[in-house]
């Protein structure tokens, strides 16, 4: 089971926020993520540098969701973009329109989102699941087994089952990308 830190940042020894070195949209661009999200009927809206991100649950540079739109800036971490997008992907299309900022319906859904975001990272050039999991760990996600990778590979059977039941992965665990 996934446990989320109280805030996705660590405090430095001096008390100032610590910004871990994670991949951002500035590193990979907006085109590939925009195309990936479009396959699921979602829109990626670029927010101006320094502007508040609409629909952001955590604030700062974290991605936001409103309806079928994921909002992000160039400094938004890729893991944040994928996490919020996956919250919309796991919802039936008729429920997406009502989403504003917080889409989690259950712990099971949150756990499925954490697995799915890693799988979708494989569809983004220069990202991949292993880098995404390392970025999740660096950012402050916490898991019972100590890392995102250990969670997905050894402790997420219920999340894998959830994704299979909802038609998002096949029997082998491969993500089912819409055409």
Image (tube, grey):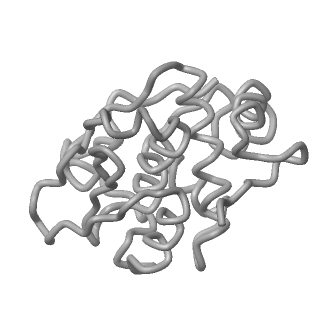
Q: Position of residue 85 (x, y in %)?
A: 45, 50
- Please indicate, yes or no, whether residue 155 appears anywhere in the rendered image: no
Please state which of residues 174 and 29 is positioned toward the viewer in this rendering: 174
Rendered image quadrant of residue 71: bottom left
Please state which of residues 21 and 50 is positioned toward the viewer in this rendering: 50
Identify the residue at horizontal 69%, vertical 45% (top origin). Answer: 168
How many numbered badges does the structure rendering display? 0
Identify the residue at horizontal 11%, vertical 65% (top origin). Answer: 50
Left or right: 170, with 23 as reference point: right
Residue that lies at the very extreme toward the front in this rendered image: 94
Rendered image quadrant of residue 39: bottom right
Whether residue 38 is situated above or below residue 28 in the rendered picture: above
In the rendered image, the quadrant that contains the N terminus is top right
Whether residue 132 is situated above or below residue 109 in the rendered picture: below
Identify the residue at horizontal 28%, vertical 61% (top origin). Answer: 72
Q: Position of residue 23 (x, y in %)?
A: 45, 68
Rendered image quadrant of residue 69: bottom left
Left or right: 143, with 174 as reference point: left
In the rendered image, the quadrant that contains the C terminus is bottom right
Q: Where is residue 148 in the image (x, y as percent from the top left)?
A: 63, 42
């Amino acid at each position: 089971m996934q446990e989320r830190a109280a805030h996705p940042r660590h405090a430095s020894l001096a008390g100032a926020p610590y910004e871990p070195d994670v991949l951002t949209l500035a590193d990979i661009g907006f085109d590939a993520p925009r195309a990936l999200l479009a396959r699921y009927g979602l829109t990626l809206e670029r927010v101006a540098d320094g502007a508040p991100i609409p629909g952001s649950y955590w604030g700062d540079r974290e991605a936001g969701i409103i309806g079928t739109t994921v909002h992000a800036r160039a400094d938004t971490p890729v893991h944040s973009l994928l996490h919020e997008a996956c919250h919309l992907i796991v919802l039936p299309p008729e429920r997406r329109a009502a989403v504003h900022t917080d889409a989690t319906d259950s712990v099971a859904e949150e756990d499925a989102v954490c697995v799915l975001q890693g799988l979708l990272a494989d569809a983004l050039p220069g990202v991949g699941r292993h880098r995404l999991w390392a970025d999740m760990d660096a950012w402050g996600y916490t898991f019972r087994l100590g890392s995102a990778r250990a969670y997905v590979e050894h402790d997420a059977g219920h999340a894998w089952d959830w994704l299979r039941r909802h038609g998002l992965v096949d029997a082998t665990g491969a993500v089912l990308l819409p055409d």
